[in-house]
Amino acid sequence: MSTTIESPNYAYPARSSGRRGPNLEKAGWIFMRASGVVLIVLIFGHLAYNLIWTPGGIHAIDFGFVGGKLAQPFWQWWDALMLWLAILHGSNGMRTIVNDYVHKPRVRKLALGAIGVAAVMLILLGTLITFTFDPCPQGADPALLPSFCASV
């Protein structure tokens, strides 16, 4: 049997101990911890490659550097995974904040819907850009392009 926590502004159904089915809040909690650990590895790997292992460090990062990096499938997948996890991690955090602080059901539903739409759009657009990026655009200044564009 479910009990309800009453307050002047809102009412939340309390989870009964005999409820069956997946516990989505627990799954979200576990996802935040796991994605946080994976994001630390992805982000520090990204920074180490760009700032430490690349000759010239931060001064070497320009359009040609990014174009050359995104022309490699390894870095496409690395950046896509980092993008997906970052957006999902941040969206799940925003969902938790909305659930904790937005007490009116209609406003909560609207806010959660907006977070979901924004997350889906960012993931789709970011993935599209990551995998369809053209490092050798026609008509660009050859001095700004990666060295491998000369042979294309």
Image (cartoon, rainbow, N blue to C red):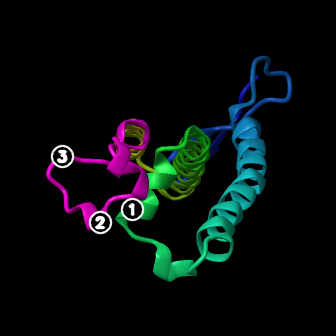
Percent position (x, y) of residue 96?
59, 51
Is disc 1 in contact with disc 3, using a CB cutoff of under 8 Å?
no
Q: Name the residue under label 2.
A: 144
Question: Is 31 in front, or is 131?
Answer: 131
Task: Say what amino acid the circle numbered 3 marks.
Answer: Gln
- The answer to which of marks 2 and 3 sits earlier in the sequence is 3
**Left or right of 47, for residue 18:** right
Q: Is mark 2 on a helix, strand or loop?
A: helix
Q: Name, please, the residue furthest toward the right.
A: 17
Residue depicted at x 77% and y 39%: 26
Q: Nearer the viewer, residue 25 or 62?
A: 62
Q: Which mark is on residue 138? A: 3
Mark 2 to mark 3 CA distance (whole Å): 12 Å
Count neighbours of disc 3 (C-alpha within 10 A) and say few if under 14, some if 14 to 19, many if 20 or more: few
Q: Mark 2 or mark 1, which is nearer the start of the sequence?
A: 1
Which one is nearer the viewer's eye here, 150 or 82?
Answer: 150
Task: Give the residue at x 75% y 58%.
Answer: 41
Which secondary structure, mark 1?
A: helix
Q: Nearer the viewer, residue 18 or 129?
A: 129
Within 10 Å of disc 2 (Cα), the crowding (few <14, some 14-19, many 20+) is: few
Circles 1 and 2 in contact, beta carbons < 8 Å? yes
**Left or right: where does residue 99 sit relative to residue 127?**
right
Residue at 74% over, 36% down: 27
**Is-magenta flag for residue 10?**
no
What's the distance in space between the residues labelled 1 and 2, CA to CA?
6 Å
Q: Per the image, is 132 magenta? A: yes
Q: What residue type is labelled 2?
A: Leu
* Image x and y of residue 118, in percent: 36, 44
**Sequence-earlier tag: 1 or 3:** 1
